[in-house]
Amino acid sequence: MESTTGWQINFLCGIAFWILISSKLNVTQKLRSLTQPWVYHSVISGTPIILNIQKYQHRHLDAFFSLLSCVVSVPFYTAFLPLLFWTGHCKLARQMTLLMAFCDYTGNCIKDVVSAPRPSCPPVRRVTATKDEEDNAMEYGLPSSHTLNTVCLSGYLLHYILSYTGNNDAFAEIIGITMVSLVVGLIGLGRIYLGMHSLIDIIGGLALGLGILTVWLYVSEYIDNFIVYGQNVISFWAALCFLLLFAYPTPEFPTPSFEYHTAFNGVALGIVIGIHQTFQQFHHEDVARVFSPHLTIPAFVGRLLLGIPTILMVKFCTKALAKWILPILANTLGIPIRSTSYIPALKGMAADKKSHEIKQSGYIQKLLFFSNQTSFDVDTGIRLLQYAGLAWSVVDLVPSVFSHLGL
C-alpha cells in the first residue's frame, strides 16, 4: 500500500514540478524559437507539392477526402467509442479511448508549442466542408492530428484483432498492415489535397503516431491492470487530469486545441471512474458480445436507441449542474472567475484582452506563481465535468440500465 501510494505521489509531484520549472524557465517560448523557424520554412517550401496535388481537383475527390476526414475525426471517435463499449468489446473500447486522449494531449501540446502555420490560403485551396473542419483550420498545423490518430487507433485495432482471434498467420498480418497503411496513406494524401496540411505536418503526425503506438503497446496492459485492480485509482486519476489542464503550453495565438484536450481529459476521467467501479459487473472479459446468442442484433439496436439519448441527457444535465455549482464554489473560495461562452452573466467581468490565452496557460500557474492574472475562465471546469459525466454514463449508468432491462 505504501509503495503504491508512493509512486503515485511521486508521479503527480513530478508533473507539478515540471509545471513550475517550465513556467519559470519559459520552456515553451524557448522550444518555439528553436523549432518554429525551421517548420515555417518547411511549410513554405512545401507549398508547390500541395499545388501539384491540387491540380487534380475534382468535386468527387473533394467529397471523398472530406468524408474520409470526417470518419477519422475527433467527433466521429467521440460518437463511435460509446458504441464500442456496448458491443461487449470493453477492453478494446477503454484502451482506444485512453489512447485517443493521450494522442489528443500529445499532439495538441506539440501543435501549440511549435505554433506552426497551416499552408497559406491562397495560393493553396482549402476545402472545409463541415463545421468541424472549419474549427480544425483554426488550429496550428504540425503535427497532423488526423494522421496521428489514424496511425495509433487503426494500429491498435489491428493489434487487438490479431490478439483476440489468436491468428498468428503471417499472411493475415501482412494483409492487416497493408490495409492500415493504405488508410493512413489516404488520410495523409487527403489532408494535403484539402489544403489543411503541408507534407511536414503529415510526416510529423506519422512519426509521432508510430512512436506513441509503440509505447502504448508496451504499457497498455500495465495501465489497464492499474485501472481495473489498482489502489487509489479514482483519486490519482482525478489529480492527474487536474494537473494536465495546467501542464499545457500557451500557443502563440489562441486556438481551440486546449478545449479539445479538456474534453478528452474529462472523457478519460469518466471512463476510468466508471470502469474501476463496475468492472466486475459490466466490463470483464466474459460479458456478452454482439453477434453472439447472448447479445443479438435486435438487443444491440435496443441498446443504441436507449443508450444514446441517455448519455446526451447526462451530458446536458452535467453541464447545467456544473454551470450552477462552479460559480458558487468559486465565489465561496473567493476566486474571481469569468466565462467566455457558457455563462452570459460572467462574460466580460474581467477586462482582459488575452482571456483565451490565459485560459490555456493554466490556472495553477496563475495561483502559485503570483502573476497578474485577475480572473479564471470557469468554462474549462464546466467542459471537463460535462465530458466526464458523459463518459461515466457510457460505462456505468447506461450498462446498469441495460442490466435492469435485460438488454
Image (cartoon, rainbow, N blue to C red):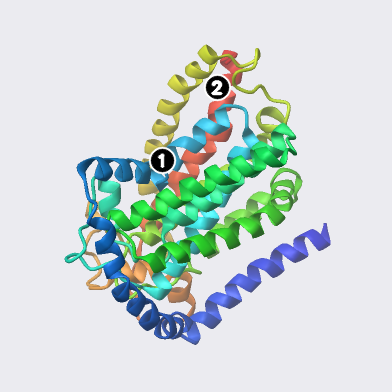
Name the one closer to the observer, 216 or 371. 216
Gap between marks 1 and 2, in whole Å? 25 Å
Q: Residue at x 60, y 18 (%)?
A: 291
Q: Residue at x 44, y 41 (%)?
A: 78
Residue for badge 1: 76
Position above or below: 181 against 293: below
* Image location of residue 101, percent across then percent down: 52, 53
Q: Which label belongs to residue 259?
A: none
Camera-side residue of 331 and 294: 294
Kindly identify which numbered label has been placed on residue 401.
2
152 up-or-down from 399: above or below: below
Residue 15 position (above or below residue 147): below
For the N terminus, give its image quadrant.
bottom right
Residue 39 sits in quarter = bottom left
Secondary element at tag 2? helix
- In the rendered structure, which amino acid carries the disc numbered 1? Phe
Q: Is residue 269 something that shows in the picture? A: no
Closer to the N terminus: mark 1 or mark 2?
1
Q: Is residue 260 visible?
A: yes
